[in-house]
Image (cartoon, rainbow, N blue to C red):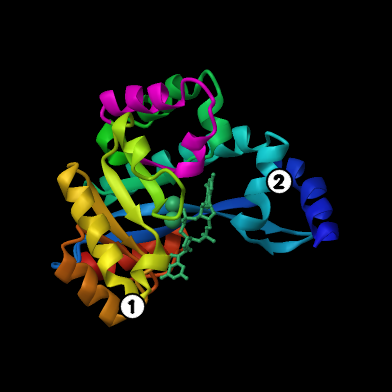
């Protein structure tokens, strides 16, 4: 309710300096081989006053107050540093997917910041996938598409998150360079409308992107993602988002 929102707004400014944030990681796997390809970083806030606060309850508040700028920088830095550590420890080339808010993209220094963070962490740009939602592009903020295309030109991967839930899904594909379509879980989980999921996967292939089936919770959904040719699958069936220590056990158990 409103009171909680106010308490979130009051508690948020201290969260970063008091180190109350943590990144969780959720694997994305190749549906045929079960091979782990990479991870999506998902932000968690352990607040001493409010308890666990879900991202959907505080990201909006952080955007309004522009706190999302330092938080977003922390997320990018932390995600990239963790990936560097994991790839070294497991001699792997996993990628990391990071959610980016529109407010971050509208900032003039966003492109430089991303490139600087990659460099500091000695990461190849193609190991970073930035996830953006369609709403980011609908706002007529100038330069957003150019900034994303510039990062794409540097090799950074660009994913459209929650694909299919926005309004202008097709129109934006004219101008924006993307590498990945993340098909929203509402399509992946809807048995009666498999045709829509199939269409989105085919669309992805026609325009030369990979597709990720999000929110795969059952064997049946996994089977469909495999049958329809989605390159990647992410969901509770494979693994829930988990802290770094659990992620390491997960990777170890799969690579023996
Ligand atoms: P998203 O980017 O679409 O992330 C996927 C969400 O689906 C995550 O929720 C994840 O826990 C959940 N999920 C994964 N597999 C399944 C499944 O099989 N079934 C179901 N029902 N859910 C599944 P989470 O972690 O609560 O994050 C919610 C949203 O908050 C994210 O949606 C993203 O939009 C935003 N978010 C999270 N972390 C960040 C961040 O670091 N920065 C920004 N700007 N937004 C973030
Ligand atoms: Mg996402
Ligand atoms: Mg999503």
Q: Residue at x 34, y 22 (%)?
A: 150
Closer-to-camera residue (39/233): 233
For the question of whether residue 51 can be seen, the reply is yes
Q: Nearer the viewer, residue 163 or 148?
A: 163
| Image coords of residue 240 (percent x, y) | 43, 69
Q: From this viewpoint, is residue 256 visible?
A: no
- Asked if residue 114 lies in the magenta stretch, the reply is no
Which class describes the residues within 10 Å of circle 2: few (<14), some (14-19), or many (20+)? some
Q: Is residue 150 above or below residue 90?
A: above
Q: Is residue 216 left or right of residue 113?
A: left
- The mark that comes first in sequence, 1 or 2, is 2
Q: Quadrant of the C terminus?
A: bottom left
Above or below — where is 126 with respect to 184? above
Residue linked to disc 2: 61
Label 1 or label 2, whichever lies nearer to me, is 1
Quarter of the image for the N terminus: give it.
bottom right
Which residue, given by chain and number where applicable, does mark 1 sit on? 192
Q: Residue at x 73, y 36 (%)?
A: 65
Q: Which residues are magenta?
A: 129-155
Q: Secondary structure at mark 1?
A: helix
Residue at screen point 35% across, 46% down: 96
In the image, residue 146 sits, relative to residue 255, either above or below, namely above
Give residue 57's quadrant in the image: bottom right
Q: Secondary structure at mark 2?
A: helix
In the image, what residue occupies the spot 17% across and 49% down?
205
Residue 193 x %, y %: 32, 72
């Amino acid at each position: 309710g409103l009171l909680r929102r106010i308490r979130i707004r009051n508690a948020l400014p201290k969260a970063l300096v008091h180190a109350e944030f943590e990144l969780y990681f959720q694997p994305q796997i190749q549906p045929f081989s079960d091979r782990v390809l990479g991870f999506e970083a998902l932000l968690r806030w352990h607040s001493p006053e409010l308890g666990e606060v879900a991202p959907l309850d505080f990201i909006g508040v952080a955007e309004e107050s522009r706190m999302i700028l330092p938080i977003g920088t922390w997320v990018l830095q932390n995600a990239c540093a963790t990936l560097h550590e994991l790839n070294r420890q497991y001699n792997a080339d996993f990628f990391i997917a990071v959610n980016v808010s529109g407010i971050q993209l509208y900032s003039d220094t966003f492109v430089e910041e991303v490139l600087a963070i990659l460099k500091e962490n000695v990461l190849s740009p193609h190991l970073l996938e930035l996830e953006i939602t369609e709403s980011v592009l609908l706002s007529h903020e100038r330069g957003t598409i150019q900034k994303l295309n510039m990062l794409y030109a540097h090799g950074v991967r660009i994913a459209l998150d929650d694909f299919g839930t926005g309004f202008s899904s097709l129109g934006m594909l004219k101008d924006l360079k993307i590498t990945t379509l993340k098909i929203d879980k509402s399509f992946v989980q809807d048995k009666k409308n498999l045709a829509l999921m199939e269409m989105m996967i085919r669309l992805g292939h026609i325009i030369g992107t990979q597709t990720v089936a999000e929110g795969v919770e059952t064997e049946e959904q996994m089977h469909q993602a495999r049958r329809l040719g989605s390159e990647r699958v992410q969901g509770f069936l494979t693994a829930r988002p988990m802290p770094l220590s659990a992620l390491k056990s997960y990777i170890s158990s799969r690579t023996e």
